[in-house]
Amino acid sequence: MSLTLQEFSSGSGAPWRLRLEEGRALIRLAVPIMLIALVNMGMSITDTVMVSAQFGTRALAAVAVGSDLYSIFFYLSAGVLAGIAPFYTAAVTRTDAHERARLERIGWAIVALLAAFTVPLVWFAPSWLNVFGIDPSLLDQSQGYTRAMALTLVPMLGVMLYRTVLTAAEKPKVFLKVTLAMLPLNGLANHVFMTGAGPIPAMGPAGAGVSSLLVSAVSLAVLVTVARRVSPPAPALIDARPDWRRIGAILRVGVPIGLTTVTEIGIFLAATVYAARLGAADVAAHTLTLRTAGVVYALPAALLQASMVRMARADSLGDRNTGQAVVAASLGLSLVSGTMILLLVVAGAGPLADALLDDSAAGRAAAGILLNLLIMLGVMEFIINPGMAAAGILRGRKDTRAPMVYALFGYWAVSAPLGIYLCEVQQAGVTGIWIGLAAGTLVTTVLTLSRLAGIRLPGIAPALPRPSPQNTAQPPRRGDIPAGRPEAGRA
């Protein structure tokens, strides 16, 4: 029997007690994930403030070129690594130490593949970015920072691997503690490498990149040590050759996640580039709204990851009631959090616009635009929350291709042309761009929820039969990683 979203709203499916338990589990998992995102944002803000204060606006612009390019490849790679999560959660649920060890080894193989692809592209970026019309002198100034960030990709991909497996094992607090410890180290290293200290020469803006390299390397070393204490490694596996079949299964899940992430980031980067063609008031209002969006987006993004992990757990158990409870709790929490963000942003829009902008004519003009954009942002967050929760549930079922297509369609076939039309033809300025973004968000959310409404629970494939006491073995499902021969897992 296929249970739809309408049936959930009418009270069918999992009992309320189980829904409440899943709701509490989602909150316990999502809160530290959200805090990790905010701490990472704090590091980025620290870099921005310190570079701007020490070396001025042009240096900040040069660093922004390298930083934005690094971010694109980093989030693409992080999304690919996220494909490990549902498989790793299943291994944790089954308490299969050997499978967890295999997946970590496969994860490192994927890290190596991603590094081989992304590091050269970022390292040589100053040589090929000039085809986009970027000021050559700005590219020359950003070269040191960009190359340092290219090297930073290597340890950061390792950090993201451990973040993925710790989240999949429902232990994100471990990663949060490590990230918090790195925040003051990041500020200190920025100062040392940018201005020099003792035998360390002053590197200028490039020092911020060297600082990122150091902090990420230290983070990785700490995570490796902590992860081995929290979860001791299984005995060595007999076959240490790359398992290309398993790598392929993970990439089929992870690559669409990475492309979806880049699609979402790309539309906002494109909106920023487009807004730069408008007046100063439009640019200022857009930039401040985008910074606010980065903060409030941390909550739905955390709920997405938590929903993915909890759904992957229910799926590995073959438990229909738990799968129903995860869906109901995830969507319920998404509506509550979306409403909360909407009310907070709308209530704070006026005071925030007054606080961030001066009383000049340009400042007043920007404040009026910012007020409208912040209210629109609150509405967008209300819309996107259930869509993100639904995407997380689908990812937990290894269904990632359809959400990728929905994001591509919603943001690039709806948001981009509608925003340009409203901005250019209707003369709506940056407000038109954000109306386009809101429309694309709505389309993406509706399509994702429609996908979720049509699945069987706990999965897209026909619901699994409950194991009987006489026969607890379950048939393999499409998308699962093959377990391999039993003897391959013995020490």
Image: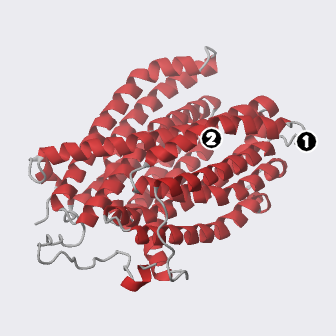
- Helix, strand or loop at disc 2? helix
- Residue in view at x 11 percent, y 48 percent: 15
| Cα distance in 3D space between marks 1 and 2 | 23 Å
From this view, report whether residue 348 is shown above or below residue 359: below
Question: Would you call the spot at circle 2 few (<14 residues within 10 Å), some (14-19), or many (20 or more)?
Answer: some
Q: Earlier in the sequence, mark 1 or mark 2?
A: 2
Q: Amino acid at mark 2?
A: Met
| Viewer-closest of 267 and 70 | 70
The N terminus sits in image quarter:
bottom left
- The picture quadrant where one finds residue 466 is bottom left
- Helix, strand or loop at disc 1? loop
Q: Is residue 195 left or right of residue 286?
A: right
Q: Position of residue 6 (x, y in %)?
A: 13, 52
Q: How many marks?
A: 2
Q: Which residue is mark 1?
A: 199
Q: Is residue 135 left or right of residue 255?
A: right
Residue 299 visible in the displayed image? yes
Q: Amino acid at mark 1?
A: Pro
From this view, report whether residue 244 is shown above or below residue 143: below
From this view, report whether residue 472 is shown above or below residue 268: below
Q: Which residue is mark 2?
A: 182
Question: Would you call the spot at circle 1 few (<14 residues within 10 Å), some (14-19), or many (20 or more)?
Answer: few
